Image (cartoon, rainbow, N blue to C red):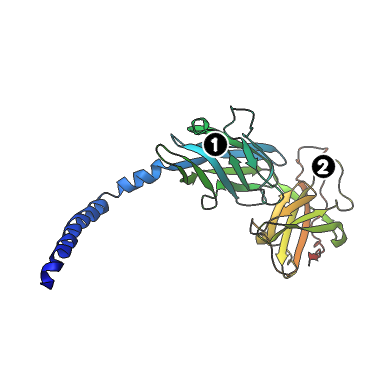
Amino acid sequence: MNLNRKNPAILILILLLLIVIPLTVWLALNPQLLRRRAVADEVTINLVPVNVEAGLAETFSLDVYMNAGTLKVSGATIALQPTNPGVFTIQNITFEADEQDVQKPFTHKIYNAQTDPYTFTVLSKRPDAQLPSGSFKVATITLQSTGPGTGTMSINTAQSEIVGIKAGSEIVNFAVAGTTATITSIGELCRLDLCTTQDAIVMVEQPRDDRKFNIQVSWTDPAGSPASTPLFYKIYRSVGQAITTPHPDSNLVATTLENTVLDTNSSAGFEGTKTVYYDIDTYMICPNPNSPTSPTPAPTELTPTPTGGLQ
């Protein structure tokens, strides 16, 4: 009697296995179908141009484009990922966002260069039918060449997010793909025997939303600086102990023509009570040996005096 009651359940289980096992095998033999679905829901962020050559102190631009295909984008957070901080710095970002201009793909932008100069958010608060799709421009990044060498600017896809509408669905998250721009800075820098002293450096903590802080480092031109040529500053940082000399490239925070730099610790911020030390070296563009009017840089044999830190 008990056996007869169990028969229907056993039969249902057998039927389910007969359906599920062949379906599982079929999907395993046809993984491209799953991949096609993922690709169809992907938005690519392109940096244009992909190769840039710039002379020292020259400004140039990278345009940020989205390729969304038939997907409609309502918002995006884009995290830029630079390498080699001595080659270039971001000067400004302008956005294709204007609530009154319907030709712009987005209506609002969120960007705080003091908190995180490499991350921004754009939003489109318009009806679904007016949301941007296809290929469209998001922003223009203005950069400046600050030191010889090659670096890259890419999209940090793990930290970026794009949301929007696809046919027959509510708001969904799209997969993010990105391209990389290679930036080559042409020229040579000559080190000047000019030391930035401890009392010439000002360090100010800049609070962040994640309970960490960035450090705004500012300084004055060292005494004896030439007035007729642009100066380049290499900023080195060490946490917990003074920077060794000669300064290791691994301690380089940035190269800049400004007298200030925001140190975000590669976007990770700072925390704790350890002292942060900075050293600043001064450079100029190496003179053209064929130009009789080119200034001659001072000797570079002397070791700069280490500067103090932020407690």
User: Can the viewer see residue 62?
Assistant: no
The residue tagged 2 is 229
Type of residue at label 1? Tyr
Type of residue at label 2? Thr
**Residue shown at the point (58%, 48%) measured from the top left:** 79
State the quadrant of the C terminus.
bottom right
Instruction: Name the residue nearer the viewer: 251 or 298.
Output: 251
Q: Position of residue 123 (x, y in %)?
A: 58, 40
User: Does residue 260 appear to the left or right of 127 in the view shown?
Assistant: right
The residues tagged by marks 2 and 1 sit, at their Cα atoms, a distance apart of 36 Å
State the quadrant of the N terminus.
bottom left
Q: Position of residue 132 (x, y in %)?
A: 52, 33
Disc 1 on helix, strand or loop?
Answer: strand
Disc 2 on helix, strand or loop?
Answer: loop
The residue tagged 1 is 65
Answer few, some or many: residues within 10 Å of disc 1's Cα (few below 14, many 20 plus, some between 14 and 19): some
User: Does residue 16 appear to the left or right of 193 in the view shown?
Assistant: left
Instruction: Name the residue nearer the viewer: 251 or 154.
Output: 154
Residue 279 image-quadrant placement: bottom right
Placement of 18 over or under 231, stated as above or below: below
**Residue shown at the point (26%, 54%) measured from the top left:** 28
**Residue shown at the point (79%, 56%) measured from the top left:** 300
Q: Residue furthest front?
A: 1
**Residue shown at the point (75%, 50%) measured from the top left:** 190
